[in-house]
Amino acid sequence: MTIALRVVLGLVGLGVIALGLNMGLGGFKTLGLQGPTDFVAPVDPTAYAVQDNHVRFVSGFFFAGGLVLIAGSILLQRLATPVITVCVMIAIGGPFRLTGEGAAEALTSGALPSLVLELTLFPLLAFFVYRSTR
């Protein structure tokens, strides 16, 4: 099971890195890795630039989390706690999709797969990393 867990961690880490790069380098408009990029039209360019900058920063954390998952797939025993921490952080972030004006969008085909993964895959990964390293 450890080999399968390592493979899953590596693949998930690559996916998380891709998502981090998509928004980290592309900002609100993204690089287009998840579809069309023409969904944003700034009304206030200054406010847009500030918020876009914040999105890029937060995406850098996502990118870093993917690096931790990949490193954990290689050094599972040594990096179990950081890997579990990243998984738990992503799982905690999932329910935040259900807050604010766009809460209903979290239950559509565009966001629901991400929400399901955040609420199922990442807690399971944390559990299996814990079990396999204790």
Image: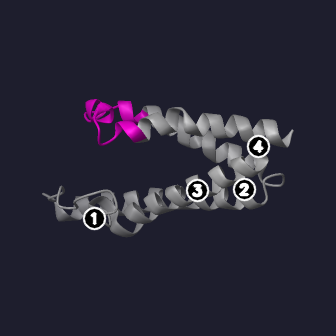
Give the CA separation, mark 2 to mark 1.
35 Å
Q: Nearer the viewer, residue 121 or 24?
A: 121
Residue 60: x %, y % from top left = 50, 62
Lower position in the chain sequence, tag 3 or tag 4: 4
Q: Nearer the viewer, residue 7 or 133?
A: 7
| Amino acid type, label 3 | Leu
Q: Residue at x 38, y 57 (%)?
A: 55
Stretch in magenta = 96-113
Q: Which residue is mark 4?
A: 1
Q: Which residue is mark 3?
A: 11
Residue 62: x %, y % from top left = 51, 56
Q: Which residue is mark 1?
A: 49
Left or right: 16 in relation to 112: right
Residue 115: x %, y % from top left = 43, 36
Q: Residue at x 34, y 62 (%)?
A: 33
Q: Secondary structure at mark 4?
A: loop
Q: Nearer the viewer, residue 53 or 2?
A: 2
Q: Residue at x 34, y 40 (%)?
A: 111
